[in-house]
Amino acid sequence: MYSNFLLGKLKITEAARMKLNRTPLDLVARHAIGDHGLVTPQELQANSEAMKTADQIVSRYLIDPTDPAQGRVLVVTDESWETTTVKLESEL
């Protein structure tokens, strides 16, 4: 897989691990190749700029694509690109 930016150390919060009931490497892969999921147009623009300046990159995906009521999960690469964290959107 080719990544558009460095992911750094991968982390997943306990709440996200429990809710997803798996390690979401598929979501991390989508994040890495620039498929940022359900981000706003403003977030998409910020992500595009962040890839040029090594700033924070955020992706948002449904926990269960068949049941949007389950909520969303975020995949966030920090400002220094040292860590990428998977967490529930409610953990902001």
Image (tube, rainbow, N blue to C red):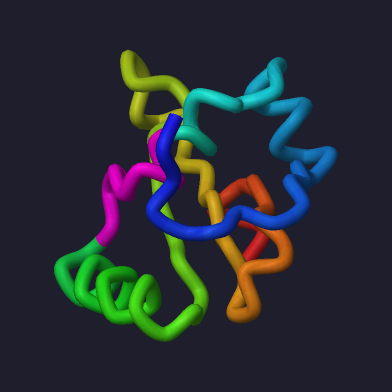
Screen quadrant of the C terminus? bottom right
- Residue 49, how many percent across, how many down? 29, 80
Q: Residue at x 62, y 69 (%)?
A: 81
Horizontally, is 24 left or right of 11 in the view?
Answer: left
In the image, farthest residue toward the left: 41
Q: Is residue 70 above or below residue 65?
A: below
Q: Is residue 34 magenta?
A: yes
90 or 20, which lies in front? 20
SS assignment for the magenta stretch, majority:
loop
Screen quadrant of the N terminus? top left
- Residue 42, how many percent across, how many down? 21, 76
- Residue 27, how many percent across, how many down? 48, 32
Q: Residue at x 30, y 78 (%)?
A: 46
In the image, farthest residue toward the bottom: 53
Q: Residue at x 31, y 49 (%)?
A: 34
- Within the image, what quadrant is residue 37 found in? top left
34 or 21, which lies in front? 34
Q: Is residue 90 above or below residue 30?
A: below
In the image, farthest residue toward the right: 14
Q: Is residue 8 magenta?
A: no
Query: How many labels sit on residues?
Result: 0
Horizontally, is 56 left or right of 88 in the view?
Answer: left
Q: Residue at x 52, y 50 (%)?
A: 74
Which range of residues does the magenta coloring cover?
A: 30-39
- Residue 13, how many percent across, how many down? 79, 45
